[in-house]
Amino acid sequence: MSQLLLLVEDEESLRAMLREHFISEGFQVIEARDGQEALRIWGEQKPALIVLDIMLPVLSGIEVLKQVRSRDNTPIIMLTARADEVDKLLGLELGADDYLSKPFSPRELSARVRAILRRSQRGDNGMHTTFKSLTIDIGRFEAYLGSNLLALTTTEFKILSLLAEHPGQVFSRLQILERSLGDIYEGYERTIDTHISNLRRKMEAISSQDVKIKTVYGVGYKLVEEE
Amino acid sequence: MGRLGLAGRITISLILIAVISTSLSGIMTLFVTKKQFAGYVGQYNQVFATQWADTVNSYYASQGSLEGVQEIITGTSQSGMRKGMGYRHGYHAKGMGDGQRLIIVDMNETVVGDSDSILLGQKVDEQEIALTAFPLVADENKRIGTLYLVSPLTAGISSLENTFISNITTQVIVTIILVGLLALLLGLLMAREITSPLGELSAAIHQLAQGKLAVKVHPHGDRELASLGRDFNLMAGKLLGQEQNRRRFMSDIAHELRTPLTLLRGRLEALQSGKLENCEEVASSLVDEVIRLTWLVKDLETIGLAESGALLLAKEPALINELIERLTPLRLAMEEDNIHFQVSVDNKVKQVVVDVNRLLQILINLLSNAMRHTEAGGEIILHIQEERGGIVFSVQDSGPGIQPEHLPYIFDRFYRVDESRNRELGGKGLGLAIARSYVEAHGGRIWVESPPGQGASFYFSIPR
């Protein structure tokens, strides 16, 4: 079942890029160029989630957020271009479900979209990411290989989640670092190796494993099926 | 008065004060002069009349009546009076003359003596002659008549007095005019003294408003004005500094963006032309470069916010243990580099109220900086201890230390001790600047000590 996203962004090229990205990730997308159009489409089509830029012509994203919130709880992810917009957004407590500062990773955006949709559709098995016998319960912060619970640290869990969301895709150490530890650890990409080796050790301790983390030399790591 | 300038106001005030005070002292002089004259005349007449009253009284005492007193007054009874009043004679002759006139009236108000011999034998109406009267009293309490004195002094002095007073008045008026003119001159000079630095300051402010930030005034004039001039120079200097800082910041940013953008462009163009095959390695390196650029933009924005004082902190109590736990990536990196990392925490310190992510960033930046300057086998110590007023963190390394000439600039953004170091080795030159801005946003202080021959120690305090 593909879900309908309303993408509100006035920057043409950015909107096109995000649309393609969301479609490739299996979403349906409708677009709006300004706040007024956004409200109209939201009223007509009832999207499952709104990705809303703050700086919009006609009606600002904040205003759209207020009006939507005054009527229902459609999940909203705000896109901000300035640090003080984030402060304002948090200060107003308008009820945005999440926010991302530009420049952001579209992959990160769709991961958050999925997480929010999962949360809002509790009871669905969408709470889990699975690959082969690996199951990741995002809500509970738990990872299983088959029926075996992996005893992971927070960092290890985040790394495994990232890899499991896109099996077969290589992630650089910097990408893994950004997702698992945040942007304050700039320059500590190499410490990812230690986390990966710990993660591997914990996975290998389970005899029935059918997935493994593969090192791609000079690039990074990916999650693959054990041959 | 509203439109009157400072110069006009000062001059006018000065003139008013001068004229008023000169007039007042002139009026006072006139008043005092008149009073003095009146007093002098009165006193003289009193003395004169008293002497004559004595003479007449003793005449009465010797003769038993005032009859024949006329001769005494006119000085004709020289034989009769010489014996009894000889001692008076000289005084008598000296006292009379000069148009002085004595009139003696008995108890019947009949003139019995007149030095001008005009009113003899006539009744006198006291109102009519209106002269200075002195009672004549003989033998204790027995009133024998009245002595009237017509003093030439009264008239004479009166005209003298008038001349004197009119002289004084003229002089006072002349003085007032002169003093007024002097006040005008002085006022204009003084006003110039005040308005010239003000005018200079105003011109300088206009220049400043037009963006000529290098403008300076020459502080002179009165103490307050000179100090105002110095304050202006201080302000202009700060503005210039900030403007230079801003320009440098912009060019630094451009410089920092150039390298990653060139790299990105090169790779992308190679991909476009088919010279470079799209493989995981290429894509991944492009993504990495973009992530670094993203982080750089975030850092620059943070510094910009911090420098304009707009950095918002999300303070909350944080456990020191959890904080140290979050330094694990650094610990791992140090292990790998064979650097001994030691953490020593004062037992008293259990938690600290901070913006946790910012504090963590400060620590990471300081520790990363220490790591960059510490060789394999070296040591880095993180101390956390309670001191008066707050908690002091220190990061001490066993590296070569910092040359004294670098110390004042060490926290400046984009300042690198070794320019030749590349980005990976030397960092972006933002770490310490960010650390400083975060510490200052918390109301704390950051400083560095680097004694020659020892490693560097960075300290920062977080107030309670």
Image (cartoon, grey):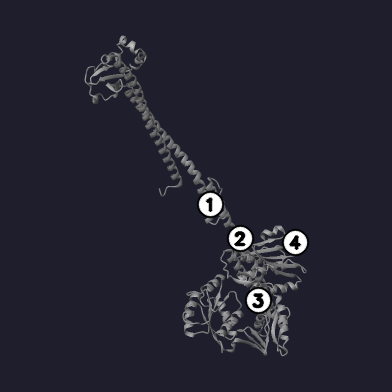
- Name the residue carrying label 1: B204
Say whether disc 4 or disc 1 marks the residue closer to the N-terminus: 1
Q: Quadrant of residue B164?
A: top left
Figure disc tally: 4
Give the amino acid at mark 3. Answer: Leu
- Name the residue carrying label 2: B245
Q: Quadrant of residue B153?
A: top left
Q: Quadrant of residue B72?
A: top left
Q: Residue B257 in the image: x percent, y percent?
A: 64, 69
Q: CA distance from mark 1 to mark 3?
A: 53 Å
Q: Secondary structure at mark 1?
A: helix
Please tell me which residue lies in front, B15 or A217: B15
Q: Are marks 1 and 3 in contact (CB under 8 Å)?
A: no
Q: Secondary structure at mark 4?
A: loop
Please tell me which residue lies in front, A174 or B209: A174
Q: CA distance from mark 3 to mark 4?
A: 33 Å
Q: CA distance from mark 4 to mark 2?
A: 32 Å
Give the amino acid at mark 1. Answer: Ala
Q: Are marks 4 and 2 on the same chain?
A: yes
What numbered label is drawn on residue A181?
A: 3
Q: Secondary structure at mark 3?
A: helix
Q: Are marks 3 and 2 on the same chain?
A: no
